[in-house]
Image (tube, rainbow, N blue to C red):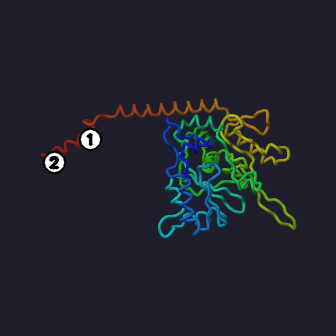
Amino acid sequence: MIKTLSQLVECYDCNPGNNVNRGVTNHLTPLNNIITNVRNFFGSTMGVIVEPGEDGVSLKLHSSKFVCPKEVSKIIDQPYLGNTSLHSYICNQGLCNMKLINLGSYYVVYFGPNDIRTAENPDKVAADAKCCKAVACTEMLQYNLNECEMDSLNEAFDDEELEDQTKEQLLKFIQGTDKVKCAQKLAELLADDLNLPEDYYFKGVKDADGNESIALRYRFQKRRPFGKEVTLSKSLINIYNVGENAVWVEAFLTKDKNSDTMNRIVETTLKLIGAKPTDDPCVYVIPTDEVQDLKKEVNTNKQESEKKEEESLDKQPEGDAISGSLKDDNKTAQQ
């Protein structure tokens, strides 16, 4: 039985996007149709298991061969019968938003629609973020994983240039829904003011409750028996959005035991993103009133810039006064 979009909207709070005032914002092909075709044409030959995502609108891929992003790309980007790849087929059905969840031993790959909710007012999307139900990854719960890093195979955003309006860009990345991309761009934006050691880095993460965030991570070595070591990572800061409970500072649970370097990096990061402390030492807010003032300031600057450009164009001479000698030469040539 094929589910209609209206049924999906009613069943899942995370997809309220088919309001008559916004137009249709769902993917092009019913999800069950995509799953059936992937199973029939790709699944058996590639050793890939496909099933609906936990949110009911995304597609989920499993394979024991998904041991790293490079191997994932090698499998899903391989042309099938010299025609199309699994990756391109799924994207052509409207599921272009891909995320890789790192479970440690292998990756789970999600393909979701990137057009849901995009027709909404961006301010309203940010305000309603708390109302959206976060959906956990089943494997994370089964393996008792509290948090996993996310990756992507989409490298197109690597070539995007940061604009001069640093504050506007900072706000954009914090509120962005693609935490993998936003984590990378936030790191680039803060690079001049935050010189991170090699063991500190920004990464998009997903927790056991399904919440996604931009995390400041710390990579360290843990001793094991018989003189061995294992490399582990943990989040020091989780940046979810703006407003209340916007930032969780895991590092401050053990602030007295942390190194001076770690505490300095954490405090500097909080200052750079505009986070303000609360009564809870681990919870920080990014005030929404400051966000609104910042948006007004940015819009005002844009309007002034556009006005100056218009005035500059108005002052330019008209066509009869431009290139007079060339115009005369053309007349002479015609005669």
What secondary structure is marked by label 1? loop
The image quadrant of residue 224 is bottom right
Residue 166, x across and y down, in percent: 59, 40
In terms of depth relative to the viewer, which is nearer, 46 or 127? 46
Question: How many C-alpha atoms fall within 10 Å of the one at disc 2: few (<14), some, or many (≥20)?
Answer: few
- Which amino acid lies under the numbered mark 1 shown in the image of this protein? Ser
Location of mark 2 (residue): 333
Which element carries disc 2, helix, strand or loop?
helix
Can you give x and y, in whole percent of width and height, for residue 99 in the image? 61, 54
Res 16 → quadrant = top right
Residue shown at 52%/32% (left/top)? 299
Question: Mark on residue 141?
Answer: none
* Horizontal and vertical percent position of residue 86: 54, 62
Above or below for 110 versus 68: above
Q: CA distance from mark 2 to mark 1?
A: 16 Å
Q: How would you rate the neighbour count of disc 1 (Cα within 10 Å): few for under 14, some for 14-19, many for 20 or more?
A: few
Please report the residue visible at 51 percent of the width from the left and 40 percent of the height from the top: 119
x and y percent of residue 78 in the render? 54, 67
Quadrant (top left, top right, bottom left, bottom right) of the C terminus: top left
Q: Is residue 157 above or below residue 325?
A: below
Find out whether the residues at labels 2 and 1 contact each other: C-beta distance under 8 Å: no
Q: Residue furthest front?
A: 1
Task: In the displayed orientation, state which residue is furthest to the right.
Answer: 226
Q: Residue at x 51, y 43 (%)?
A: 25
Residue at mark 1: 323
Q: Which of the two labelled residues, at mark 2 and mark 1, occupies the earlier sequence position?
A: 1
The amino acid marked with disc number 2 is Ala
Residue at image x 53%, y 50%? 160
**Foreground pick, 259 / 139:** 139
41 sits left or right of 133 in the view: left
